Image (tube, rainbow, N blue to C red):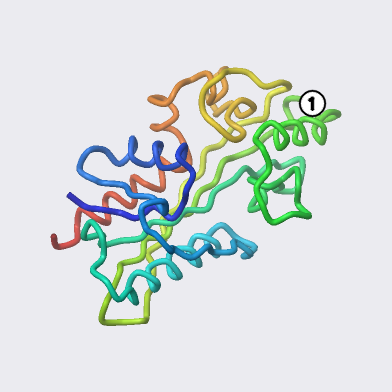
Amino acid sequence: MTTLLIATRNAHKVGEIQAILGANYRCLTLKEFYGAPGVVEDADTFAGNATKKAVELARWLSNMSIDMPHSTRFVLADDSGLEVDALNGAPGVHSARFAALDKSENSPDADNNAKLLRLLKEVPLEQRTARFRCVIALAEINLLSANIRPQLFDGACEGRIQLAASGQGGFGYDPLFVPDGFTQSFAELGEDIKNKLSHRAQALAKLKVYLSMLPI
């Protein structure tokens, strides 16, 4: 079984990643690694933020003076968000803190959704095209080398932003996002469907292919 440290404390995200990867992978979180450093996501691209998190955490684990817990071999870091065409790609890398861009911490989902609807108030439905985008960085924990070069995997899910939120499932912008080919939001479609369509699912599918070709 491959063990991955997922570079997040977001239980929703970890649960989604574990469900997509399946039982052959064990997903741990930062909560299980005492003293793990916080990484400031200040890059201007998803790839930049994912790479920074993966490299810094893999380097930290490589330098630990104690045995690594759980025989963890990789750090998996992702950065993802919503790109709305009518807003020139916003909120983009600022998706999690869209309602409070002047602060470093994330904003509540309800506040982010409310801001998005407010900015799109005068935009007709046919012009509300958008996509969820994800970039995953996979860094191997190498005790013998400080030169860590992560592998990158990306995915995107096209859709549109509806006029009002619907559904109780999912998280983030899921109640507002309707993927192409559907009439229900991600929050209504449920995890089984979302985990086949989503931007993160597409990136993780590429990652699984890569991991399957590595020697055990």
Q: Nearer the viewer, residue 216 or 31?
A: 31
Compared to 107, does 61 lie above or below?
Answer: below
* Residue located at (55% from left, 28% from top): 180
* Residue located at (27% from left, 56% from top): 210
Residue situated furthest left in the rendering: 216
Q: Quadrant of residue 23?
A: top left
Compared to 5, does 48 lie above or below?
Answer: below
Spot occupied by residue 14 in the image (x, y as percentages of width and height): 41, 42
Compared to 200, does 187 lie above or below?
Answer: above
To which residue does mark 1 refer? 124
Indicate the amino acid at tag 1. Pro
Spot occupied by residue 203 in the image (x, y as percentages of width and height): 41, 48
Spot occupied by residue 133 in the image (x, y as percentages of width and height): 54, 46
Q: Is residue 4 left or right of residue 59?
A: left
Spot occupied by residue 17 in the image (x, y as percentages of width and height): 38, 41
Q: Nearer the viewer, residue 96 or 118?
A: 96
Using a 10 Å C-alpha cutoff, classify the residue at mark 1 as few (fewer than 14 neighbours), some (14 to 19) or many (20 or more): few
Q: Nearer the viewer, residue 93 or 84?
A: 93
Q: Quadrant of residue 196?
A: top left
In the rendered image, the quadrant that contains the C terminus is bottom left
